[in-house]
Amino acid sequence: MFFRILGKDLKRKRVMNVLLLLFVILSATFASASINNMVSVYGGIDYFFDKAGMPDFITLTMNSDGVNPTEDIVRNSVSVTSYQREDLFFYNAKNLKKDGKVYVDFENPGIVTSVSGARLTYFNGDNEEITEISPGHVYLGGLLNDPEKVHPGDVITLELSGRSREFIVDGYVKDALFGSPFLGNPRMLMNDGDYDYFLSDETIRSASCGCAYYINTDDGKALKKELTAVKNALFGESISTIKITYLLDMLTAVLMMVVGICLILISFAMLSFTIKFTLNEDFREIGVMKAVGLRNSSIRGLYLIKYLCIACVGAVIGYACSIPFAKLLLESVSRRILLGNDNYELIGLISAAAVVAVIVAFCYSCTKGIKKLSPVDAVRNGETGERFKKKSVLKLSKSRLPENLFLALNDVLSKPRQYVSMVVTFTMCILLVTMLANTSNTLMSEKLIFLFGTTESDAYYNSTEKIMETMGSDDPDILDHIIEDIEKELKDNGMPGKVHVELMYTLPVEFGNEKMNVIMQQCKDTQASEYKYITGSAPMYANEIAFTPQIIDELGARIGDRVLIEINGEKREFIITATMSSFNQVGKIGRLHEAVDVNVNDASSAMAFQIDFDDDPDAEEIDARIGRMKDIFDTDKIYNAADFVNMSTGSAQTMSDAKDLVLLIALIIAALVTVLMERSFISKETPEIALMKAIGFKTRSICAQHTLRFVVLTVICTCIASVLTVPLTRLISDRVFAIMGAQSGFEYEIRPLEIFAIYPLAVAGVVIVSALLTSLYIKSVRADAMGNIE
Amino acid sequence: MNKVIDVKDLCKTYVVNKKQNNVLRNVNFSVEEGEMVAIMGPSGSGKSTLLYTVSGMDKMTAGNVTFCGKELESLSDNEMADVRLEDMGFIFQQMYMMKNLTILDNIILPAVKSKRNKGNRSAVEKKGRALMKKLGIGETADNDINEVSGGQLQRACICRSMINDPKVIFADEPTGALNRTSSDEVMEEMVKLNNEGTTVMLVTHDAKVAAKCGRVLYIVDGNIRGEYKLGRFERSETLRDRERQLNNWLMEMGW
């Protein structure tokens, strides 16, 4: 009997049950896939580091006269428990060619390691350890682990200092140190013979060789202090910082998780609405069941079994869908990371089962309403007798609104509780998209330019070659010559302007007992006061300095304290006058006053050459000139301010792609919710629709009235979302930016047209079209169907 | 007198579980302008189906219904809606109203919708209030529908059916859900309405209600078995006599 009633109910409310099933499927799919993704990525990084043999600390330094300055320190340090040295040499994008053209354009110096000299364990695409490479073959990793640009089987040529050799790309290498796109130094792993061929060249040995030290320590702080003696370290970070560089992978996983949670919440909102709606609809049946002696628990059981059935079926289908979906989500991550999660199925099953359990528990609490219904409800038309609650809000006789708009507005205002779940859903949809759009727009906006420690210029010319030329030379004036050359070239081409560049120096900083290497930025051609600071005042004299809060915290210092910095072999005292925000070095950086005399040849790296044209051209002219400069300097790496930020953050595109995916999901959810709700309204309001038809309303007029309700709702949702989007973006993205290094002092790029018009309109459009199409079902309601409460 | 309704060979068949149920079989009758016609018959005889089919609320299976010179079958849904809005009024056994509107707003809703009253909402409101006052429910204008009695609500339904000055009012057991006092009040209003020139066609089980009509059609198994002409009801003292005549006739018909 129980199951016969259930069967009838499933059949009778087919459309609503199918829509409910769809929501459960979506929830289960997202819950399973995103939890799987989270577990895989989060646990995967630890697993990968463990299998790759990542140590506690890694430092990367250029050799000086064939000797690496780190060797003595690590060999004699008491805080080092063990270490391994990996020999390597550097190359840049122009050294790697295919068919005579640059193979892949990249900014960071590339690293070449021999397979037997490798001290980390490297894995190929099949997760097998790479122990052997044939002569003339290479594996590529880091930024070169990109199937859009690099294809196994490609024949490439490495040309360095007159030495040249052709290689066949065997595949991608999973590199724990440079696997994240945030670091992304292109790694090339080759045969020992090939490696030695390049190393046999004296110029390469003296100017391009370096070492990576993989150090295990029992006192990280002491080790850091000791390593401050190493000048010009290219890289020196603990394993925890390197893990942070995988933040983007984590962000995508978290984002999917958030979308999954939102979907589950929306499913609950829908469930809550549907259950309450069904109970309202079934008042007569429930009353009769009570009248004939059925207990509350039996009646609740009837409903619970129905939802349990829907939840189980939905969870099974959702789980099945989650397997390919999870694989899709993990595809880009698993290409770079050795994932150790072999329990996809189990995690997916547990997540899907959790969705069922939560839905059934939720349904149980929602069916509490059954207790309140009494047998008398069966004869009192669903009212308990405790009535006299005012329902009408607006008055048609006093209103000047068109009748359809009046009826729609009055309906929304008269039964606000009925629309809460929809307002929450649509607002959430708009907010999810606009928050991501705000973040991705900010990440590609020139407003963040100061977070890279640069002033705003007309154009940014990135040249690893020229910077490496400076670093590898003994000529103290080489940078001035390079700048003069660029300026001359610009002038000769009718674009006179000033050029300057931000150099970075790794300098040991002491405060009390604390000692650490800090990357310092300095530009001789700008003034320290031209940069943005969070607190304090800009360094005004050569003995003043600014740090990021991360450095100040690590040193235990405050503004006004004096620190000792070793420059050109001499310890000098500096007063901390300000704090600043920066994305550089994950926020661990300082700024020297322009008057501080540092040898440019000691620079460890540099930002782009910044170009400020003399004639102050407009944005259009700047873009045109950038195009011309690309031809003049034969490079693509010349950007305007916004593109420079976009290129430097590297995450804007990921965020933008995620936003597009979330927008698609949001639109699907909005459409599904609208169809479910409108279908429910038609079912619930059949007598009223019939009455309206009976008194002469045309079907299109009733459809318009129903659709207008959704218009009213989307207007309300847009208003709420418009108020909340900026504070919520700040609340969430401030934390993301803080992890990336910038703790405060930046503004978000809010594009009003996009945030307050395009995305809300997209959601509203989908909602309104869905509502209109669903409302066409009203045509099937006959004018004499007033008594048909079903 | 003009025929406002002319029904020829009207058939209505429902198909339930692949079985045909012929509810109306070749029904023929007509209603003159200003008439008040009652349809009576045993339960399941097809009274309400006849009313709904004749008023165009339900589709006929075969036959022809002419309403004020228009063949209902040939009208599109939109044209039918216009006819219902401008020329027909409906009163139902259950007092169906829009839950979120006040009594007055429910009454004036068809008038607001009507093209005749476009842009003249204050006149519509005035007319609605006047109708309510006339039917003795003026004080309930701003009440919600759950704040008034069944009798008041049914009178509000009558007001709504009258708001656009329809040519014909169709009523499906208008007093079925009311007690005797309320029933008498409602019928009194219907008779007044008829006396003012509105054609009324109603379905009822109650001989006392039917006795107030000028003509009674008796339907059995989807066929009109007979009709009884009582003539216009003008004086309440004649009601008892009309009721007796009607009951005698109904007994003859097998009531």
Image (cartoon, coloured by chain):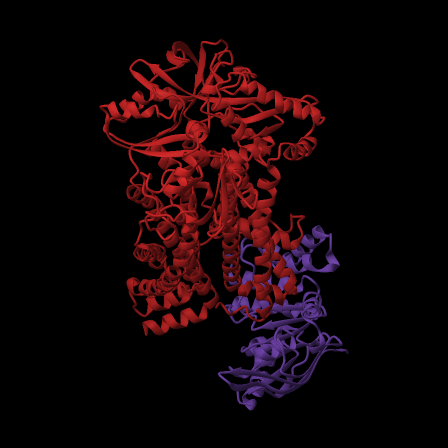
Please give the name of the residue rendered at 60% of the width and 53% of the height, measured from the top-left corner: A708
- Nearest to the observer: residue B60 or residue B116: B60
Query: Percent x, y for residue B218?
Result: 59, 85
Q: Nearer the viewer, residue A550 or A164?
A: A164
Q: Report whether A526 appears left or right of A790.
A: right
Percent x, y for residue B82?
Answer: 70, 66
x and y, in percent, of residue A42 in the image: 34, 44
Q: Residue at the location (56% across, 23% down)?
A: A455
Q: Is residue A30 left or right of residue A641?
A: left
Q: Is residue A545 above or below residue A145?
A: above
Q: Is residue B168 left or right of residue A563?
A: right
The residue nearer to you, when weighing B30 against A754, is: A754
Visible residue check, residue A755: yes
Q: Which corner quadrant of the image does residue A701 belong to?
A: bottom right
Judge from the rendering whether residue A64 lies leftward or rightward of residue A153; answer left or right: left
Residue at image coords 41%, 23% = A232
The shade of chain A is red
Apparent colour of chain B: purple
Task: List x then y, in percent, for residue B90.
Answer: 62, 68
Q: Quadrant of residue B134?
A: bottom right
Q: Is residue B229 above or below residue A143?
A: below
Asked whether residue A451 is in view, the answer is no
For the image, the number of numbered tags is: 0
Quadrant where the image shows the N terminus of chain A: bottom left
